[in-house]
């Protein structure tokens, strides 16, 4: 199975299945000398682990990370870092029925079409638990970026029709609300909306947003390795994400050049912009403004109401899915978005070290 490795210099490979013994990640290209311990990573994993509220799956997992290699006496050595999280709460029998049919909205059919075989226990590699590896690596990327003065912050922008009010934005609320919304009023309304959907045996979609501040101008390449293109790929690689926007996103198609262009100006001796419709990226290269990314997430496909599907014998059947499932994916996925953004940006900054001769001269001379 190809496609489990991501990155050029800061490179990650995730491994493991939802109902296997463990999941994890191998990180290659992490610089030596970074102070690192399990607690640095655990704080990120705690944001995505299940069973934290009534709007997440009741599956209980501690998701405790173990550092297996690449760290000695509290610092990275430059060797590959291997991280592992053991599964402790699998109930595989909940999924025994689906071995013979294809769940609507899931990867069951496409896995069979590609491989002629699939791990039906919780989705195997297509399960959301695969993101444990991404978040573990993302915690390390975020720590490095923070030392460079860069902050990566993701949160829930909307759930169904309930959107946050920018005037009520409160950074601390992201980690304190059930929905990961930075607007406490929107959070309360969204929870009511979700509880109603759950009563109707249904699920809900939403939008995640990520703001990256402190990024210098000049990161990214202008053709196939555009920073926004790679960020979009990173976001689309997250399960259930169906659309990605940078800056004004789809609104640009209804705009005009005079209103969409960001005017440049000088501020404290630095070139900056009066507006940020571009979302911090021009021509595939960062322009120094905050990078704004939004990812649209579909409703959880595992719903408890009756659905129609086809089994492996080609018979049309009605099904009622069992198991433990999130009524919405977004609140637990915001840290995955944050992690993938950090991994992508850090890798681009490492690649950027070779863009100018003066950079090599400054380092080696």
Image (cartoon, rainbow, N blue to C red):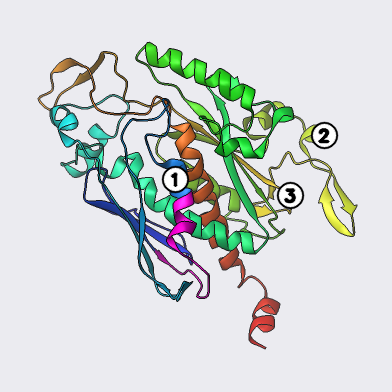
Range of the magenta residues?
Answer: 27-43
Viewer-side residue, 319 vs 284: 319
Could you give the CA–CA distance between mark 2 and mark 3, rounded to whole angstroms? 19 Å
Residue at point 36%, 52% (across, down): 64
Does residue 148 lie above or below 329 as drawn? below
- The residue at which mark 1 appears reads as 46
255 over 136 or under it: above or below:
above
Find disc 3 in the rendering and name its residue: 289
Q: Residue at x 61, y 71 (%)?
A: 353
Quadrant of residue 196 within the rendered picture: top left
Q: Which residue is mark 2?
A: 258
Residue 316 forms part of the magenta stretch: no
Task: Tell which tag, 2 or 3, sits nearer the viewer.
Answer: 3
Tell me if label 2 and label 1 are in contact, CB under 8 Å.
no
SS assignment at label 1: helix
The tally of labels here is 3
């Amino acid at each position: 199975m190809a496609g489990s490795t991501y990155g050029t210099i800061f490179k990650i490979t995730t491994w493991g299945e939802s109902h296997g013994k463990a999941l994890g990640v191998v990180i290659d290209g992490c610089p030596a000398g970074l102070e690192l311990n399990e607690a640095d990573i655990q704080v990120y994993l705690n944001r995505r682990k299940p069973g934290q509220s009534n709007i997440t799956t009741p599956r209980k997992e501690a998701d405790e990370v173990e550092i297996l290699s690449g760290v000695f006496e509290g610092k990275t050595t430059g060797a590959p870092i291997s991280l592992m999280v053991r599964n402790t709460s699998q109930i595989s029998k909940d999924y025994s029925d689906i071995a013979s049919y294809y769940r609507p909205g899931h990867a069951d059919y496409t896995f069979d079409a590609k491989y002629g075989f699939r791990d039906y226990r919780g989705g195997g590699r297509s399960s959301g638990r695969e993101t444990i590896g991404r978040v573990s690596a993302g915690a390390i990327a975020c720590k490095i970026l923070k030392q460079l003065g860069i902050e990566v912050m993701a949160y829930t922008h909307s759930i169904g029709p309930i959107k946050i009010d920018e005037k009520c934005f409160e950074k601390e609320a992201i980690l304190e609300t059930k929905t990961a919304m930075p607007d406490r009023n929107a959070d309360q309304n969204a929870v009511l909306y979700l509880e109603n959907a759950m009563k109707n045996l249904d699920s809900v979609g939403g939008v995640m947003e990520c703001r990256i501040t402190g990024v210098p101008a000049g990161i990214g390449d202008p053709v196939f390795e555009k920073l926004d293109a790679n960020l979009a790929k990173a976001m689309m690689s997250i399960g259930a994400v169906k659309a990605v926007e940078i800056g004004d996103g789809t609104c640009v198609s209804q705009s005009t050049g005079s209103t969409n262009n960001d005017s440049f100006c000088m501020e404290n001796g630095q070139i900056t912009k009066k507006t940020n419709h571009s979302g911090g990226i021009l021509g595939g290269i960062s322009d120094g403004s905050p990078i704004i990314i939004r990812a649209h997430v579909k409703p959880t496909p595992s719903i408890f109401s009756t659905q129609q599907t086809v089994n492996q014998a080609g018979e049309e059947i009605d099904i009622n899915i069992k198991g433990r499932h999130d009524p919405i994916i977004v609140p637990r996925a915001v840290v995955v978005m944050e992690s993938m953004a950090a991994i992508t940006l850090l890798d681009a900054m490492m690649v950027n070290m070779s863009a100018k001769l003066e950079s090599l001269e400054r380092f080696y001379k």
